[in-house]
Image (cartoon, rainbow, N blue to C red):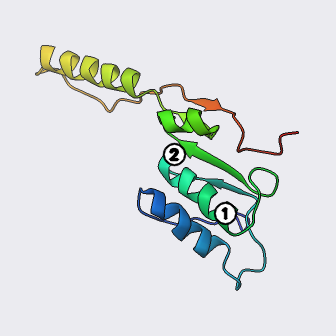
Amino acid sequence: MGDDNVIEVTVSRSERAGAEAVASLWSNDRPWHPTAVFANRDLVALGLITALRATGRRVPEEVSVVGFDDDPAAAAVGLSTVANPLEESGERAIQIIQDLMARPSATQSPLDVELPVLFKDRFTAGPHQ
């Protein structure tokens, strides 16, 4: 990724993947360990938190954990997450498809569609006093 302070670990999209990431990121052969982890989905973040706590690490005091997609479970357990506007993105995709179908012979250029995301800071990112 180009930054010596960033480690990218590829795991599956399951809760078990969180434990796999902890095993990889906190292996004894690393000279330093992360202070923050961003998971590709909330379920993975929940698995990370479970595995971190099982190894005695405190979230968020020692390690911040942030998920992605704002699963209902995230709110229930206080997981900090990035909310992805799935409904809005689906509506926008349908609108684009309808526009394309209405003008099939028109020359189409690539679309650059930007939708807002929202960081929901709950209780797993940064020290909370």
Mark 1 → mark 2, Cα distance in angstroms: 15 Å
Left or right side of 88 for 51? right
Residue at image location 61% in from the left, 68% down from the top = 22
Q: Amino acid at mark 1?
A: Leu
Per the image, the residue denoted by label 2 is 42
Per the image, the residue denoted by label 1 is 52
Q: Residue furthest toward the right?
A: 129
Instruction: From this view, report whether residue 57 is shown above or below residue 118.
Output: below
Residue 117 placed where, x, y %? 55, 29
Locate residue 28: give its quadrant: bottom right
Q: Residues within 10 Å of mark 2 (few under 14, many from 20)?
A: many
Residue 48 placed where, x, y %? 59, 58
In the rendered structure, are the residues bearing label 1 and label 2 in contact, judged by CB atoms less than 8 Å apart? no
Residue at image location 88% in from the left, 39% down from the top = 129
Q: Amino acid at mark 2?
A: Asp
Q: Residues within 10 Å of mark 1 (few under 14, many from 20)?
A: many
Residue at image location 69% in from the left, 34% down from the top = 122
The one nearer the camera, 52 or 2, is 52
Residue 40 placed where, x, y %? 50, 51
Residue 92, visible in the rendered structure: yes
Helix or strand or loop: what does disc 2 sit on? helix
The one nearer the camera, 89 or 80, is 80
| In this view, the mark in front (1 or 2) | 1
Residue at image location 47% in from the left, 27% down from the top = 114
